Amino acid sequence: MKASELREKNNEELKKELLELLREQFGLRMQRGAGQLARPDRFSKIRKDIARIKTVMNERSVAGE
């Protein structure tokens, strides 16, 4: 997911996307703990997407939108 795509979404969509990613991250952590994780590279992608969403949300709050 690109930051430019995220900037086109409104705050509600960003919050929804963030919640979905956090849930997916939690599920992956549980799989890793159980030794059933099939795609360990997914961790870094999800973590970076979460950071992108939080960055866009912070930019908007600082700008006063």
Image: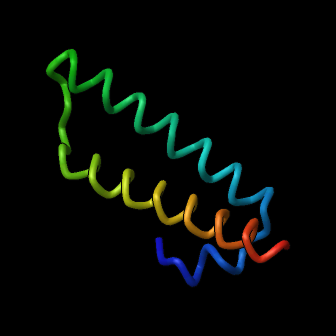
Counting from the top left corner in percent of width and height, residue 57 is at: 67, 63
Task: Answer left or right for 40 relative to 51.
Answer: left
Q: Position of residue 43 (x, y in %)?
A: 28, 46
Check the image and name the residue furthest to the left: 35
- Vertical order, 18 against 30 (above or below): below
The residue shown at (61%, 73%) is 6
- The residue depicted at 41 percent of the width and 38 percent of the height is 25
- In the rendered view, would you say 61 is above or below 32? below
Q: Residue at x 73, y 70 (%)?
A: 62
Q: Examine the image and state in which quarter residue 29 appears.
A: top left
Q: Nearer the viewer, residue 4 or 65?
A: 65
* Residue 23, horizontal then vertical, whole percent: 51, 34
Judged from this view, the residue extending furthest toward the bottom is: 4
Residue 65: x and y, percent?
85, 73
Instruction: Judge from the rendering whether residue 62 lies leftward or rightward of residue 5; answer left or right.
Output: right
Residue under the point 80% across and 56% down: 12
Where, by quadrant of the figure, is residue 26 drawn?
Answer: top left
Decide which of 10, 36 is in the foreground and name it.
10
Q: Is residue 63 above or below residue 42?
A: below
Name the residue furthest top: 34
- Give the side of residue 38 with respect to residue 61, left or right: left
Foreground pick, 52 / 26: 52
